[in-house]
Image (cartoon, helix red, strand yellow):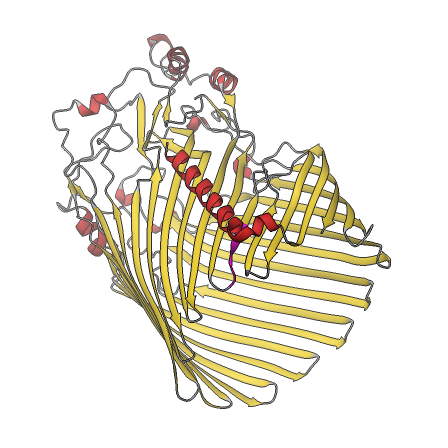
Amino acid sequence: MKRRITLRALIGALTAALMLAASGGLVRAQTIKNGHVEIGQQRLEGDRSSSKFEEYRHIPSGLFLNRLYLNLGDQKNHRYFQLWATRPAQENQSVFLQTGLTGKVALEVQWDQTPHFLSMTGRSLFAPSTAGVFTLPTQTRQDLNKLVTTDTNPAVAGVQPDMTAIGNLVNGTARGFDLRTQRKTGKVLLRYTPAQEWDVRLQYSVENRTGSKPLGTNFGFNSTELPEPIDYRTQELKASSEYATKRWDARFAYTNAAFNNDVKALVWDNPFITVEKVASPSRGRLASFPDNTAQNLAFAGAINLPKASRLATTVSYGWRRQNEPFLPLTINSAVAALSTYPALPATSLSGKVNILNTNITLTSRPYRRVSVNARYRLYDYANKTPSLTFAKYVSYDNGLSGDARRSLPIAHTRQNAGLDVGWQFSRGASLKVGYGWENWERTYRDAPKVDEQTLQAALNLTPTNWFVLRTSYARSDRKTHEYDAEEHVAHFTYPQGESGLGQISELRKYDMAARTRDRVMAVAQVTPVDVLSFSASVGYANDDFTKSAYGLLGDRNNNVSFEVSYNPVARFALFTNYTREDYKYQQKSRQRTPASGSNPANDKPANDWQSDLADKANTFEAGIDGVLINNRLDTTLSYALSDVKGTIATRTLGATDLVTTAANYPDTKSKIHQVAAALRYHLSDSVTPRLEYRYERYEATHFAQQNLNPFMGAVDSGTSSSAFLGATQPGYKAHIISFLIGYWF
């Protein structure tokens, strides 16, 4: 029903637009200023059995409409009507309509669709469900339970489950389906300009997202991957008024947004359990994203001051609310029947967050060659949600926890300030130096206060009209005050002090850890002659987490790129570019379950391990644009390559007591080739046929997706009672041949 209301609203807006265009005889007069239409015939060949081929697009086969543009006008009465449509009637279509009276009133209607194809290899024991309830036939569950449970018969007690039999049953029963989502966005904007200085706007937008995507659920160490149904809707209403003069301007705005999720919770059968017990749930339940609302009031203004100065400010205050009813603590009837099963502390969250955002900027040029830019920002995220204490809670639907636990209304205040001074010390040469400060004050996080200071400089040189050089360097130093996860988080999370967070005390989370940061950038462009141009850039960044004994220790990356453009004659152009990117990270942690057991005495530095991760990406592109017959025949040809490689090297750091010795992971690789060629013939000023050919080849190797099936017990015996989707994105090779005719009028 809600979708019908949304569709009716959009149809009503489109009807209003057409009526507005028709008023005064615009459509009746049909004064066509210009227009364009392009239709085509397309053929697809090759192995396209991968969701990667159409991951964010739709490539039709057969006859299709590619573009449509229509511009109607009535100059006498200043009326206009414009329509743009790209890929109409396709899954990734975009339509934009604009009509109104020039300088007075305008109505815009926009519709966009974006597909996201996740996998074509998904298979599940469950049938697709739009309501979020996934059930299995009783016989299938009984057969799986019998194969997994090896101690039901004393004569075979201790015998390992028959992985082959389980795999044959799961993989043979699982049915295939595509995992994909579709995003549809509609927007209607009415703009009224009663005077040259005054602008009033009213806008309504709606976004629907439907489909299914993989979701991992579990009963402890046993996983069940589900095709989560997606049915989201976000509606937003905006109203604003702006008044501007030569000296000052002011703007007021109000926004009201609402998010609705038609799937309130997911419920699924445990494929391997048929008789429900406290430690053996036969079903699981998980809440989905809750409905919520957000409102915001905003003011923005600016005023011109003496000395070529301008002061600008924005202030906004927002309310976010969420009060979705709580689900029961468990769906496991055996747990719910326990005499110690507690009641919920409240029926719903009553979530309340208020946000204050303030920005102040002052720009000035007190002297001809000197510029000053000062700025300040305050962002206050005030979480007014009640803090609730749960006497007990249920983990994975398989038993009550022994600790009371309290929900924490996490909040923060962030302040930024900065000052930049620029000096043009000679013609074609300028220097800018700046200082920046950032402060975080957090509530119920590991570190209550973090400060960061940044010094930066930029040098720009243009000594001649054929050479440009831009460079910059920034150095940041972030300091953390009173980092103590147990004191600031665990102390409040466990009000009775029964348990801690269970993390290494020396661990530092990267967003609050002390850190030094260096950033270097240089860009150069050389044009020795008009027909030849070179450009190159270099970037380097290094994050060093100086006080982190565990967690992210370092993050270093660099990039180099160059581009060459050669245009010897008006009828011929050649271009090529190359980029190399290198990323390196270091992480350190500790094995929590050593071979001798989980006794805290064995939780020692000898069980530390470190991973060194590296990603390298190479991107190359080259192309030619040329005119074969002047004013008649022209062509384009291009080739692009993207090659990415990832490595994870892991090593132990001491006399290890680990369950499994650390080892390197296999490399991950992905590569995509793209070849595109087009031949255009200008049959007349109005008609241009075009022949296009495109070749794409995608290759990927990832250890996490090798041999991936719904049942993986034969690969890892620890997953003998788990069921997955087997969703992957294999490689593809595709040929796309298109013939299009464009007509201008």
Position of 52 with respect to 414 (left or right) is right
Residue stretch in magenta: 97-102
Of 501 and 14, which appears nearest the observer? 14
Position of 231 with respect to 499 (left or right) is right
Image coordinates of residue 612 in percent, x first then y, are 50, 53
Residue appearing at x 22%, y 21% in the figure? 333
User: For residue 732, what is the image quadrant?
Assistant: top right
Image coordinates of residue 583 in percent, x first then y, are 54, 57
Of 173 and 547, which appears nearest the observer? 173
Image coordinates of residue 47 in percent, x first then y, are 69, 32
| Count of numbered circles in the view | 0
Of 439 and 170, which appears nearest the observer? 439
Q: Is residue 325 above or below residue 446?
A: above
Q: Is residue 485 above or below residue 272?
A: below
Position of 285 with respect to 717 (left or right) is left
Q: Is residue 536 above or below residue 85?
A: below
User: For residue 7, what is the image quadrant?
Assistant: top left
Q: Can see residue 651?
A: yes
Residue appearing at x 67%, y 51% in the figure? 35
Q: Can see residue 452?
A: no
Residue appearing at x 81%, y 52% in the figure? 682
Q: Any magenta on residue 635?
A: no
Q: Residue furthest right?
A: 629
Residue appearing at x 43%, y 24% in the figure? 720
**Dominant SS type (magenta):** strand
Task: Look at the image and tell me in which quarter the N terminus lies.
Answer: top left
Image coordinates of residue 275 in percent, x first then y, are 29, 15
Of 679 and 574, which appears nearest the observer? 679
